[in-house]
Structures are given as structure tokens and as C-alpha cells.
Image (tube, helix red, strand yellow):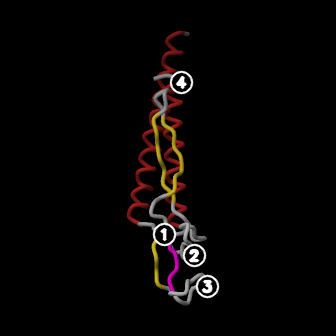
Amino acid sequence: MGVGAIGTALGGMRAASLRLDAAASNLANAGSTGAPPDAAGRSNAYAPVAVRTTATADGGVRADLVPRAPAYESRFDPDAPDAGPDGTVAAPAVDVVVELTDVLRARQGYAASAKVVAVANDMMRTTLDALT
């Protein structure tokens, strides 16, 4: 484990951080509503996001935010300011259990990557001590 391991672990830490940010944003906006989607499927309601991870050529990971589908679910709330003529609003399709699971996955992934950084650092220190 050398600098490459640290770089890979830092990529994992960034991915875990992004996963936590996405889950926090989704949970914070879960109770919001917006206008029902128009003919093109657009709404001013919060659209939940997910994290897509892909392997990189150097053995690391790349994380990107992607829209979650379906983004909205229809709820009946005729008193809402954004309610359509039928009394429905668009609410973000957020599953609290899925989001809390993502928070736990982010926590475990970050901790594992941090441990890799610590071990790689210890190995480099031991190697340098042996050479001096």
C-alpha cells in the first residue's frame, strides 16, 4: 500500500461523503411538495438524487449524483398552493428507509477508507524508518 492506496481511499471517502450529502438532501426535502408534473414531466418539486459509482482505470472509484426515478409521486393535498385542478401535488419519491440505509453505507464506507489511509501511512512510515 503506497500513495496509490491513499489516492484510492481518498476517492472512496469522497464517494461516501457524496452519498451522505445526497441522503441528507433527500431526507430534508422529503416533506416538500410542488406543482404536479407538466406534459414533459417537469415539476418544481424537489427531485431526489442518488449516487452512481463507477470504477476508474487506476483502481479507484468515481461518484456522481444522478436523478432518482421516479422522481415524484402524486399526493392529494387540495389546500396546497401548488395543487393542480384535481387537488394533487407532486411530492419527492423519497423512501426514508432507503435514505437511512444510504447514511449507514456512507458511514461504513468512509470509515473503511479512512482505515486504508491510516494503514498506508503506517506502512510508508515503517519503510522510511527502515531506510534511515
Query: Foreground residue, 33 or 5?
Result: 33
Q: Nearer the viewer, mark 2 or mark 4?
A: 2
Q: Earlier in the sequence, mark 3 or mark 2?
A: 2
The residue under label 4 is 3
The C terminus - image quarter: top right
Identified by mark 2, the residue type is Gly
At horizontal 49% and vertical 32% (from top left) the residue drawn is: 56
Cα gap from disc 2 to disc 4, whole angstroms:
47 Å
Q: Residues within 10 Å of mark 2 (few under 14, many from 20)?
A: many
Residue 52 in picture, x, y percent from top left:
47, 47
Segment colored magenta: 87-91
The residue under label 3 is 81
Numbered circle sitting on residue 34: 2
Identified by mark 3, the residue type is Pro
Residue 40 in picture, x, y percent from top left:
55, 66
Q: Residues within 10 Å of mark 4 (few under 14, many from 20)?
A: few
Q: Nearer the viewer, mark 3 or mark 4?
A: 3
Q: Residues within 10 Å of mark 1 (few under 14, many from 20)?
A: many
Cα gap from disc 1 to disc 2, whole angstroms:
9 Å
Query: Foreground residue, 26 or 44?
Result: 44
Numbered circle sitting on residue 128: none
